[in-house]
Image: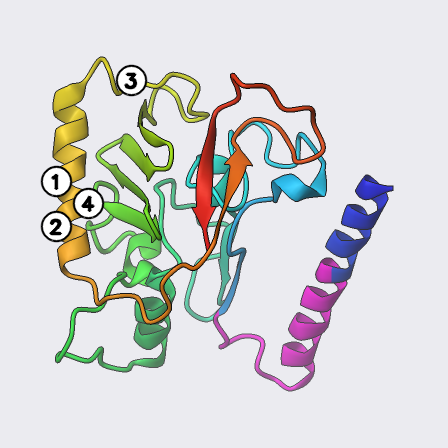
Amino acid sequence: HRLRVYAAMIRGLDRSVGRVLAALQDNGLDDNTLVVFTSDNGGAHYLGLPRVNHPFRGWKLTHFEGGVRVPFFMRWPAGLPPGTRYPHPVSHLDVFATAAAAAGAELPDDRVVDGIDLLGLVRGDQGRGPDRALFWRQGHLRAVQYEGWKLIRAERPARRWLFDMRADPTEQNDLAAVHPERVAALEALIAAHDAEQAPPAWPSRAETPVSIDITLEDPQSPDDEYTYWPN
């Protein structure tokens, strides 16, 4: 039943995307409209579907790849070559700068704007991007990915996970104890990034534990790895 419901939701989403694209075509806007298709997070543990994020670990509400690695498609027949692939990680924060560039609008210069224009990267006429730092944060949870390494930091439980994403993209081997100097360097990046951010307008008020490798429907064990998700 769970799989049937999930499949029905996916089918409903697919039909809705089709309606949007058909409306653009019917109104003569198809060729010169930038369409971005993505997701805010990976599949959730409460679905009870153990392979929904396979082969990646983690779920929605975590900063493991199963929670943060999602599809990201851009379609713009007049502005992007069809079939182009960009192999490096990008961020949802890039959507603003990318949409501004597509519209020919200037970014505001009175504040720091997170994210970069992806059009130049995809077209191959802009070199910046592959080795930049990407950050995630929510409550006490922090994560950074930089130059092929990813650090996930939680305060409850007090834990650091370090992964070599080029050799271990599914985050099976925690190297935090092996490379303390790398942990320290990535912690410094997180601290510098946090120092630039405004205080949250709505601080977290509640937390719930999320097992990293099992669904909410699976029997739990004291050995299961987990984080607390602040909300």
Quadrant in which the N terminus is drawn: top right
Contact? badges 2 and 4 (CB < 8 Å): yes
> What is the three-letter code of the residue carrying label 2?
Ala
Give the x, y percent position of residue 38. 52, 57
Q: Which residue is mark 1?
A: 188
Sort mark 1 into few (<14), some (14-19) or many (20+) by Cα contacts within 10 Å: few
- The secondary structure that most of the magenta stretch takes on is helix
Quote the CA–CA distance across marks 3 and 1.
17 Å
Please check the rendered image and state whether residue 115 is part of the magenta-colored stretch, yes or no: no
The residue at the far right in this view is 1
Quote the CA–CA distance across marks 1 and 2.
6 Å
Contact? badges 1 and 2 (CB < 8 Å): yes
> What is the three-letter code of the residue carrying label 1?
Ala
Q: Residue at x 73, y 53 (%)?
A: 10
> What is the three-letter code of the residue carrying label 4?
Ile
> What is the three-letter code of the residue carrying label 3?
Leu
